[in-house]
Amino acid sequence: MGRYILGRLAGLFSAFILVSMLTFGLMHSVPGGPFDEEKQPLPPEARANILRKYGLDKPIWEQYLRYMWNAAQFDFGIPFQSPTETVTALIARVWQPTLQLAVVVILFSYSMGMLFGILAAIYQNTWIDYAVTAMATLGFAVPSFVIGIWMILIFSVTLHWLPTGGWGDPVHYIMPTLVYSAAPMAMVARYTRVNMLEALRADYVRTARAKGLGERMIVLRHVLRNALIPMITVLGPMIPDIATGSIFIEATFRIPGLGRYFITSTYTRDYPMIMATILLVAFLWGITYLLSDLTYTFIDPRVRLTGGKGAK
Amino acid sequence: MSVNAAKLTNGPKDPALKKRTLWRDAMRSFLKNRLATAGLVIILVFIFMAVFADLIAPAPYYKSVLSDNLKPPSWQHLMGTDMVGRDLFSRIIYGARTSLIVGFAVQGIAFLIGLPLGALAGLRGGWADFAVTRLLEVMTAFPSFLFAIFLMSILGPSIPNVILAIGITSWIGVCRLTRAQLIALREREFVVAARSYGADDARVIIRHLLPHALPPLIIMLALGIPTAIFGEAGLSFLGVGINDPIPSWGKMISESLGYLRVYWYMGLFPTLVIALAMLGFNFVGDGLRDALDPTMYNV
């Protein structure tokens, strides 16, 4: 077990290095820097001074090593788009709307997904079941920005109930939450339904029925408890995905979050900001993959991590 | 279920039974699946639109009549016109071409890289397997979509660049699946038996391994195409996808964002076709999965 974790951590670390090297190398290999003539007309001496200040006059490997050394100490440099603060501060600031939305989305999608899944299982093969399945299919297959446009067309353009976008008031949460929840809710509903159906057919439920327990008691006492425990493992991998936000949702509803700033950073070639965002996401994803794999082994002992040929 | 029932009632007397193969069975159960058939029809319509766009479209996709801009749907412009007076119906038809080219080309890259790498790892084992497994591990933690956006901002918008940016990480699933399939298959009795009567590597691979490894790979291909189409639409929606004036559904949606309040049709029609395309491909993928391999529910 310990060896397995060490191996995975080594893999994570090399992934991290590869991502950083690729991004860094590509960023600096292309023409068009943030201090180009057409963007900021400056005398040559002033430009040289700026390049020296940001270390852009050094050879690329030296820039990379220096960057990583600083990054290891949580110093990701200064964002070109907002030179009065650090990248760390800027990310912390723009991550807030994303995280606030993420908390609402996780709570909403999880509770509603479970509710729908439970209903679909109890009323299996009725219209409720079919409606939930149809919704889940739609939530999975249709891109979030497509559903987002439909919401805007219905609730803003036709009914005039909600603003088309923006951030700050509680009303601004409604549409992004509904749209962003569609996919995770669909997933939770589908898993809950399958787990519930399995539990409903289990021997202990038959025993409970045999001893004359009411259907209500059976579902509340026996089925729910057994069906919902495995749902913990589904939650894990969802969190970093939702916590780093959806670029699409933020673009559709004009939310000033992490994803939207990533896009503007790529437009303006804000190297420090691009680099830090990609590293942050790679780090969070990597750690979560590892953690969710480990959780599976604790919950389901049949999953073996180490072992013979062809394991895993 | 129904296949088993047919087997029981008809018995071996049924002459059709002799001709039963995996593919024939799969086709029958696929066509019985109403959603899958509907999906197939949708896809065929989109393919038809893409191939014959020049004949169907009432106007060239690039033709802009500035005096005719932002017109609501009418008989002349079935889906209205956009802010520079281009016929949206024509652009949607040509958009099918963009989407399908990207969808198929990305899967081409995915299989071109993933299949040989996975086969190498699965058949050779040893150091090759070790290297490929490590590579897969590294790529799993790779933030592919963020990286694609970043790559597009460097390469500049165009169809080949979109294919490259999405394709570069698209082979991971194919590679992992090929490897896993071959590892599971190469120890099976029929392969060992084939080797014992002296079949060489080429014969074992072509006659025994490939036919068994194929169904899951076909499912992966069918579900990979909508993923790639989604990727293109997403990149274009964010403004780093397809270059003007080539139409892309994702780009049309992003252009509509500022106009939705009054010009609702600019957003409605492109979102509808994307939703239809995604559902069509997903239904076909799910149908193929049910038809080809009833034991496999999670790829």
Image: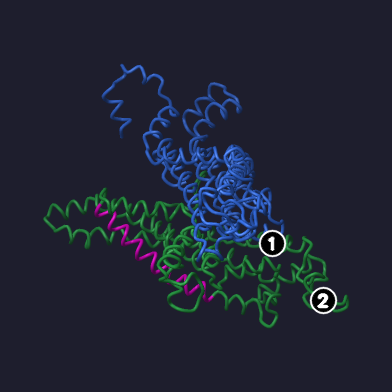
Chain colours: A green, B blue
Q: Secondary structure at mark 1?
A: helix
Q: Who is closer to the viewer here, A125 or A162?
A: A162
Count of number-bearing discs = 2
Q: Percent from the top left, x then y, of residue B287?
A: 42, 40
Give the residues in magenta: A96-123
Q: Percent from the top left, x then y, of residue B289?
A: 43, 40
* Kind of residue sitting beneath label 1: Thr
Q: Who is closer to the viewer here, A225 or B127?
A: A225
Question: What residue is disc 1 on?
Answer: A23
User: Residue at 70% across / 61% down in the picture?
Assistant: A21
How many residues crowd around disc 2 within 10 Å: few (fewer than 14), some, or many (20 or more)?
A: few
User: Residue at 49% across / 63% down in the picture?
Assistant: A291
Q: Secondary structure at mark 2?
A: helix
Query: Residue A52, labelled with which disc?
Result: 2
The answer to whether residue B281 is seen in the rendering is yes
The answer to whether residue B175 is seen in the rendering is no
Tell me the quarter of the image containing the N terminus of chain B. Answer: top left
Above or below B266: residue B127 = above
Answer yes or no: are tags 2 and 1 on the same subunit. yes
User: Residue at 55% across / 64% down in the picture?
Assistant: B259
